[in-house]
Amino acid sequence: MKDELRWWLVLTIALAGMTACSQSSDCFNADVFCAALVTDTQGINDQGMNQDTWAGLEQAQADGIVDQIEFIESVDSRDYEKNIAYFVKHGFDVLVTVGPGLRDETLRAADLKLLDPVLDEQRGMPVFVGINQPDDESCPNFIPVTFPEDQMGFLAGTLAARISETQIVGAVCETSGIDSMWRYCEGFRAGIIFMNQTTDKNVKALVVYRDDGDREKLFVDEDWGRNSANSLIQRGADVIFAAGGSTGQGALRAASEAGIYSIGTERDQGAALTGSGLGVVTSILGDASFEIQKVLRVPGQVQPGRIKYIPLVQTFSESLTQEMDVLIFALQTGEVKTNVTLSKP
């Protein structure tokens, strides 16, 4: 088995050498601290985790935390292994990968370093950081950075209740069989309950999951997202929260077409959807820029990561922004709890 793993590393490094170029020869120098990013297929300008992580690396370099940074954009998921191996070959100290789709390849690369003492002696053991990749206690060479989807949904729920005029709001999520989707939308529901309990509001939450859809359309069923949002709008919802890749984006587009507010997550959906996302008042997402700088300063377990939101559109008061800031702090400190389970019971 070890021989097969070594063969894999040699092969992928060779392939990477043929398809990429680097200016990273100094990374073998013990006095030069190098960090690299391998994106998922969304690319470096995804208005989400890839872009935010790179911004964090750029800031870390500007602050003198890291000496050299580089990135490779993955065009296809089949590129993940060779892109990671490329930076291993060139002696980088920290390798950052983004998205759950890269988790297996990242862990395999981290394990290979542990299994090959010759390579360890030659260039030392790099640290692997997985953004939005679940923990794996069996691999001490891997630092997971995850974000509390329940808190993001909770914040979206409280905002939706705050700005709704009909007192009916909706959430459209991918299948509840995916834990992160469950936490997003149940967090949203919990946020509505919190607002009803702490204010004089009586807001109704309509939450739908794509539980009966085609498995091959996971995260890309935009028509379902659009149709589901339209159904909720017909039932009186005047604010829509959505999560789940293109599936969720379909719901956000429907809200914009109907002239009502919507709240996004996973990325800056207003920017990502451009003209078809005019109804997006904010997006709530993990603060990857902050967390990667934190990892580079003090490597170790950092989850759950900090969350943030894209500044609210100018039609909302400054006091509403202050309320959101206070609630984020209360969620982070545990003063306010979502009481959402990690997975569907």
Image (spheres, grey):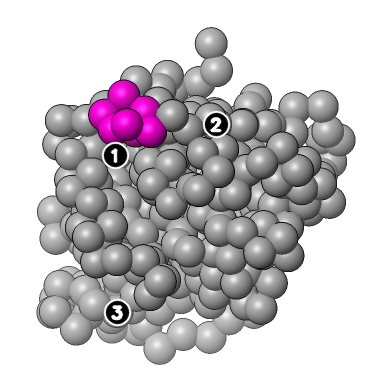
Secondary structure beneath label 3: helix
Kindly tell me whether residue 112 is visible in this rendering. Answer: no
- Up-down: is 52 above or below 107? below
Kindly tell me whether residue 287 is visible in this rendering. Answer: yes
The three-letter code of the residue at mark 1 reads Pro
- Up-down: is 189 above or below 311? above
What residue is at 83 percent from the left and 33 percent from the top? 213
Return the mark for residue 205: 2
User: Residue 6: x and y, percent?
Assistant: 54, 48
Secondary structure beneath label 2: strand
The disc, 1 or 2, on the residue closer to the chain's N-terminal end is 2
The disc, 2 or 3, on the residue closer to the chain's N-terminal end is 3
At label 3, counting other C-alpha atoms closer than 10 Å, the crowd grade (few under 14, some 14-19, many 20 or more) is: some
What residue is at 21 percent from the left and 74 percent from the top? 60
- Closer to the eye: label 3 or 1: 1
Rendered image quadrant of residue 11: bottom right
Label pair 1/2, CB-CB below 8 angstroms: no
The three-letter code of the residue at mark 3 reads Glu
User: Residue 69: x and y, percent?
Assistant: 33, 78
Tell which residue pokes out farthest to the top in this image. 345
| Magenta region | 195-201
The disc, 3 or 1, on the residue closer to the chain's N-terminal end is 3
At label 2, counting other C-alpha atoms closer than 10 Å, the crowd grade (few under 14, some 14-19, many 20 or more) is: many
In the rendered image, which residue does mark 1 sit on? 304
Number of marks in picture = 3
Marks 2 and 3, how far apart in space?
40 Å
In the rendered image, which residue does mark 3 sit on? 58
